[in-house]
Image (tube, helix red, strand yellow):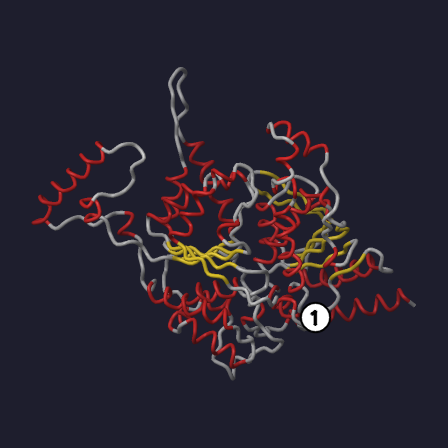
Amino acid sequence: MAAYTSSLATRCLGRYLIKHTQNNIWISTSSIAKGYTTSTCNPSTSPLTPLNKARSDTSASTRTIEQHYDSLIRCGSLVEDTQQIDALHQLGQLQKTLRGYSNSIYLTPPKPKAKEAKDSNAKQQKVNDYKLSKTEGDDAPTEEEERLLPLPPPRGFYIHGDVGTGKTMLMDMFYSHVDNGRKKRVHFNSFMLDIHKRIHRRKQSTPQRRLGKMFTYDPISPVAMEISNETCVLCFDEFQVTDIADAMILKQLFQTLFRTGVVVVATSNRPPDDLYKNGLQRDAFLPFINVLKEYCQPMGVDSGVDYRRLDLPSAGKLYYLTREPDAESFMDTLFHELAVRQNNVMGPRVLTVQGRELRLEKTCGNIADCTFKELCDRPVGASDYLEMAQAFDTVFIRHVPMLTLTLKDQARRFITLIDNFYDNKVRVVLLADAPLDRLFVHSGGEDDRDRMLLDDLGLSGDVGDHLSLFTAEEEIFAFQRTISRLTEMQTEMYWTQGDRSNTTYTQRGSQ
């Protein structure tokens, strides 16, 4: 009887998903906005535009962000939130400032007029002479220098708050309404991956050092200049620093971006002063926080409500427990139901990621059926998950264990996996050993690898007790975001929006 019921439920869910993903259903912004109710809007009776469509719809920039937000409130797609309204007011002011904004003046200062050239050259010579006479480390501009410098660029925003409070929604509204052809929206993980690729490429292209000759080359500022020449408005989702390699280059990277007129709007779960908290060699990272706060105004959005966890219509049962009878067969049937639509053969698939091969054993078209070990228990990372997000719109993840502190590496990968899938609207079906809110357990402890690493770094056990690298503090903090996102990823609205069968998929941040 249990098997029959499970099979019937699977067929019903499969038919539901097929029926709803085949129809071109109009979905309101609320599918990725966190301040939503359960209702949607009909485009035939409402002037609203879906947020994803707004990114490619130039008419979106003719309205202010506040007008767009008000229309969503009237439609019933959003719940009015005073903190969101305050944030939108400030973002709306920046939207007006950035209309037609260009950072070219910071990249190539304007040449003086012919009749002023002689005086200007003389002034510049004085400035140059004085620069040579200044002591090392004295960066304060002189009066002569200040007269030659353009006005400071517009100040961006660093939007921080708890999970599910609408930070990404606010940034996406801002991005879609900014009338600027040189803007880019990207997940921070993806951005840093691109930065490291560019740094590596530049290092590879530099001439080899001759024997006995010293040669030093710092590619960070040139890479930042590349970015500045490509874009003048950067929107980052999930600004977080967990890697020491990222932490050590951020100050120089962003100082160059800011000084060349790039305006940044970012979201994060942490306030600026808590970035890279308890990280290895954090003292060297702290100057970046001051640079960030100088060019990006911190703005808290924290109403205390996780809008993703409101009672929204479910897409069906998408989270299974290993102890449930016939859970595996239920997922098998659902996979086959969805695979029928693919018009493709079932089998392994190899993805090429930065010259490496990532093999997935069971795929069919744009559906992948994976195990936790395949995705998180081997040396893979954000670049691999990003490649998967571009290749698949639905991923089954089986045998997710209870994540203890002993499995810190796997937990980090799982968090990064869900971040990338969520940001690219990949749909997931999970089979796990524990309910979602009890999947990450703050127990376990130091293993042999931790002790070896402490020895290699020359650190005592007492120091290791406070470093996030060993305490998993960052994972504990970030997993709240993962739970919130996985909750939304099980809703009808998310699943419908994640279907790519009738649309041309565009990766976020590719604009």
Residue 289 in the image, given as x and y percentages of width and height: 45, 47
Corner quadrant of residue 242: top right
Residue furthest bottom in the image? 45
Give 370 or 314, whichever is nearer the viewer. Answer: 314
Q: Dot 1 corresponds to which residue?
A: 314
Q: Is residue 4 above or below residue 221?
A: below
Q: Residue furthest front?
A: 462
The x, y position of residue 23, in whole percent, is: 62, 73
Q: Residue furthest left?
A: 115
| Residue 471 x, y percent position in the rendering | 65, 42
Examine the rendered structure and indicate whether residue 50 appears above or below residue 324.
below
283 vs 438, left or right, is: left
State the image quarter where residue 458 is shown: top right
Residue 461 as seen in the image, left or right of residue 101 = right
Q: Amino acid at mark 1?
A: Ser
Label 1: element kind: loop
Query: Could you classify mark 1 by the number of other residues whose Cα lies within 10 Å: few (under 14), some (14-19), or many (20 or more)?
Result: some
Q: Residue at x 72, y 71 (%)?
A: 16
Q: Is residue 123 rendered to the left or right of residue 384?
A: left
